Image (cartoon, rainbow, N blue to C red):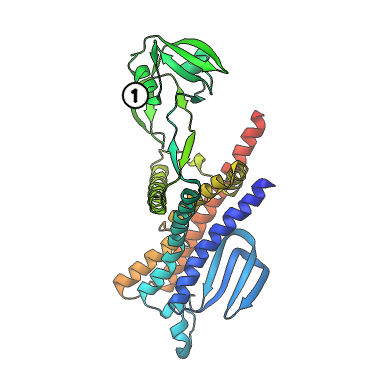
């Protein structure tokens, strides 16, 4: 129930933000908006205010803004062309299409700013407490456990994780003696670090060094900061996540990151439920991350997505005229086929993960 509730909250808000971007910029340029819908398919509820009908539709995975005159070949009376999308200059249509993804990116920035302004700026706690032990690692075989605090290595007191990392690295594989604090008691462990490959966030090998297979605790502390510092931190956070999202897509295309890592609605619902249980701040962070993903994915040059429309508008701006109705129709069919295939694939990944967990339990 928690997963369903959080899924509805997260997806509903992000779809609304995206479509509101299209809607408000269309209004700004004088385009008549006929429908504003959260979801696709049959109307569940709807009400008309002014010239726009606002809807909640049956299929929740998306939404749309229907504008007057946006259909190819649509006949528009001469007196109404000033309110028609297709009769607006290319740069205005480009701005209307681009506004959806940009609003998602801006929304993430706002969420991060709220988080930092309310909770403070996160600072990693420099500790020697072990947060995780890699399965099958030297540390696991030696009996080191998550939650242990490293007091010393070979008689040298350790007060920071950098010291721990340096002493393990300089062991050159010889046996070292670790004194740990576990449940208020001291425990002495002997272990020989092994040469392991270092991987970046995408799983690429970037080097190697002697390691035990331990990861420090990810505990952070929050420190209050002026609003200007919170805004700057939110901007940096947003930019970093945009970069990681773009690089993640590139790595998937390069087959560095396996396609099995892709998740769909079921996976989003699971993670959203976990974040809601962990607290509203965690849910806001996840929502910001997902908003950036939604914005970037919509900018991909795939017909049907906003990025595909931007490509068509760019070609029109260069040529001085739009592509033929036939070319547009064929491109849309290809886009629908690609999007449909991707949806089936991520649903398969989600279900396969659930089956794997069920088989392993």
Q: Is mark 1 on a helix, strand or loop?
A: strand
Mark 1, residue position: 208
Q: Which picture quadrant has residue 156?
A: top left
Residue 303 shows in this picture:
no
> x, y (%) of residue 353?
60, 38
Could you say which is closer to the camera, residue 66 or residue 179? 179
Seen in the picture, residue 256 relative to 316 is either above or below; the reply is: above
Neighbours of disc 1 within 10 Å: few (<14), some (14-19), many (20+): few
Which residue is found at the position 64% from the left and 29% from the top? 360
Side (left or right) of 140 relative to 321: right
Numbered disc total? 1
Residue 343 point in image, percent of width and height: 55, 51
- Residue 53 position in % (x across, y down): 60, 75
Residue positioned 55% across, 60% down in the render? 15
- Quarter of the image for residue 159 reads top left
For the point 44% across and 13% down, the residue is 178
Position of 188 relative to 197 (above/below): above
Q: Residue furthest bottom?
A: 79
262 or 54, which is in the foreground? 54
Considering only vertical position in the picture, is 356 above or below 159? below
């Amino acid at each position: 129930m928690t997963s369903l509730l959080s899924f509805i909250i997260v997806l509903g808000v992000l779809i609304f933000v995206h479509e509101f971007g299209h809607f408000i910029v269309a209004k700004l340029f004088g385009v008549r908006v006929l429908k504003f819908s959260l979801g696709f398919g049959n109307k569940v509820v709807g009400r008309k205010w002014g010239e726009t009908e606002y809807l909640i539709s049956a299929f929740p995975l998306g939404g749309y803004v229907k504008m007057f005159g946006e259909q190819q070949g649509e006949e528009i009376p001469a007196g109404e062309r000033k309110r028609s999308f297709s009769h607006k200059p290319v740069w205005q249509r480009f701005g209307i299409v681009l506004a959806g993804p940009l609003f998602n990116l801006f929304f993430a920035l706002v969420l991060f700013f709220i988080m930092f302004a309310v909770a403070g700026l996160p600072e990693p706690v420099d500790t020697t407490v072990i947060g995780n032990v890699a399965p099958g690692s030297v540390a696991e075989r030696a009996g080191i456990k998550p939650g242990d605090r490293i007091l010393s290595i070979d008689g040298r007191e350790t007060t920071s994780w950098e010291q721990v990392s340096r002493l393990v690295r300089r062991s050159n594989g010889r046996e070292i003696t670790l004194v740990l604090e576990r449940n208020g008691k001291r425990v002495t462990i002997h272990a020989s670090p092994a040469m392991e490959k270092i991987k970046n966030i995408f799983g690429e090998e970037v080097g190697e060094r002697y390691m035990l297979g331990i990861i420090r605790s990810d505990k952070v502390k929050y420190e209050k900061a002026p609003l200007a510092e919170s805004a700057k931190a939110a901007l940096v956070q947003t930019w970093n996540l945009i970069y990681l999202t773009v690089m993640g897509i590139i790595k998937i295309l390069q087959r560095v990151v396996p396609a099995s890592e892709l998740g769909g609605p079921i996976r989003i619902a699971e993670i959203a439920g976990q974040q809601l249980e962990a607290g509203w701040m965690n849910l806001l962070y996840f929502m910001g991350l997902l908003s950036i993903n939604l914005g970037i994915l919509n900018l991909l040059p795939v017909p049907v997505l906003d990025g595909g429309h931007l490509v068509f508008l760019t070609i029109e701006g260069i040529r001085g005229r739009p592509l033929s109705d036939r070319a547009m129709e064929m491109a849309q069919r290809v886009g629908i086929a690609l999007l449909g295939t991707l949806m089936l694939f991520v649903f398969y990944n989600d279900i396969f993960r659930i089956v794997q967990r069920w088989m392993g339990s």
